[in-house]
Amino acid sequence: MLKLPYVLIATAMTAFFWGIYGIVLRKGTSWMNLKEDTFQGEIGISLRAFVGVGLAYFLIAVLVPVALLNRKRETGYWSFSGTMMSLFAGAVGALGALGVTLALAFKAPAIIVMPIVFGGAPVVNTLLTSYLNKSFKQIKPMFLLGMLMVALGMVGVFLNRPAPNTGKSKASADKVQLADSESDASASATPEVKVKEKAVAQNWLAIGLSIALAVVCWGAYGPFLHIGQSKMGGSRLRPFCCVGIAYFVIAVMMPIVLLESTAMHESSGYTGWGMIGSILAGTCGALGALGIILAFTYGGKPIFVMPLVFGFAPVINTIGSIIEIGKFESMNLMFSGSLLLGILGAVTVLLNAPKAAPHGKPATGGEPPKDSQLQNSQIGAGGPAALAEPTLGTHKPAE
């Protein structure tokens, strides 16, 4: 049953927290201790910030759901396939967060990273959903137009990105222009200049690959999480718990092992403010993930929930980034127009997404027995998992 006010509140919750996620994460990363300004040092502080994100997910998405599940019975049940799919969704989400973390660590401004991610993710989301539903034949011209709008809008965002407006900016620009003119007059460039130019090129390549990782993974996150929730009878806390476990493994255990076993351990270090900022960023991400689950639980459909999330999250991110820069006049008209074009394209893609073919009537006996919650609870402790499970689209969540 659709409860529209609750759906809108949950959707707004996700859009807000995901909108400020990149800004807070960049702050937390910048507050980490960079002992050596090297490639290893940059990766080191990004991984340390990523650990903070994983710790926040563990606290919010694992400890809290486990405590609530032990206090009262919740709608839904544990199932092996639902648990595996939710864990996979959490792993995909964690890798997407790693992509954002690395892009910010490579000095990419959050004001361009997040709009590109939020513009590209819904396209991946829709293509993956169409593949899973085998509905590519239903693709409409408006869907292709929306994809083109997203691509053009995100390219425009990148090319017309606003820069921080400082008092030294004009003087610095004059010095750079003078230096460029002198270098053009010289017969040959020094080896140091060539090395610096090569490093800059490599840096933008790393930024592009990091953003691509975030776009693909966050685009795939929603469909897999929805499948996992469906295979758990519409449960809210169980798939959320699985997401938190996946984040803990990928964002906490693996980075710590990597940091302690490589030279990155000596090139960077933790700081109190850096951990606070990173944990706050992880809190924003976890609350945003919870908002999506709540929106689906209250009857929301991806066809209008996701356009709202991916449409308003970059707007919130842009406003927050401009406030952080301190000068609203640093936003030029081309950037604003490109951002709006990308947002409209994302909404167009999702509103004109191919629809899945209707399912047949549910098969009798597909729903687990009433005591399946108690029986399936053994799964988390390594118990038997060979219990009856409904397939996606062939069961109704328990009331």
Image (cartoon, rainbow, N blue to C red):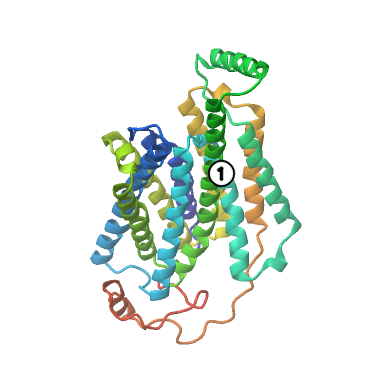
Front residue of 355/117: it is: 117
| Quadrant in which the C terminus is drawn | bottom left
Type of residue at label 1? Answer: Gly
- Quarter of the rendering containing residue 278: top left
**Residue at x 61%, y 13% (from the top left corner):** 178
> Where residue 168 sits: x, y (%)?
50, 14
Return the x and y of residue 104 as percentages of the image width and height: 46, 39
Relative to the observer, which residue lies in front, 141 or 94? 94
Q: Residue at x 48, y 87 (%)?
A: 364
Place of residue 335 in the rendered image (x, y in percent of width and height, measured from the top left):
63, 32
Question: Going by the picture, which residue comes out furthest to the bottom?
Answer: 364
Is residue 314 in view? Answer: no
Q: Secondary structure at mark 1?
A: helix
Q: Is residue 119 above or below residue 173?
A: below
- As drawn, is 331 to the left or to the right of 52? right
Q: Is residue 254 above or below residue 34?
A: below
Count neighbours of disc 1 (C-alpha within 10 A) and say few if under 14, some if 14 to 19, many if 20 or more. Answer: some
Q: Residue 75 at x, y = what percent? A: 37, 69
| Residue name at image x 51 percent, y 29 percent | 322
Instruction: Say whether residue 176 is visible.
Output: yes
Q: Which residue is mark 1?
A: 208
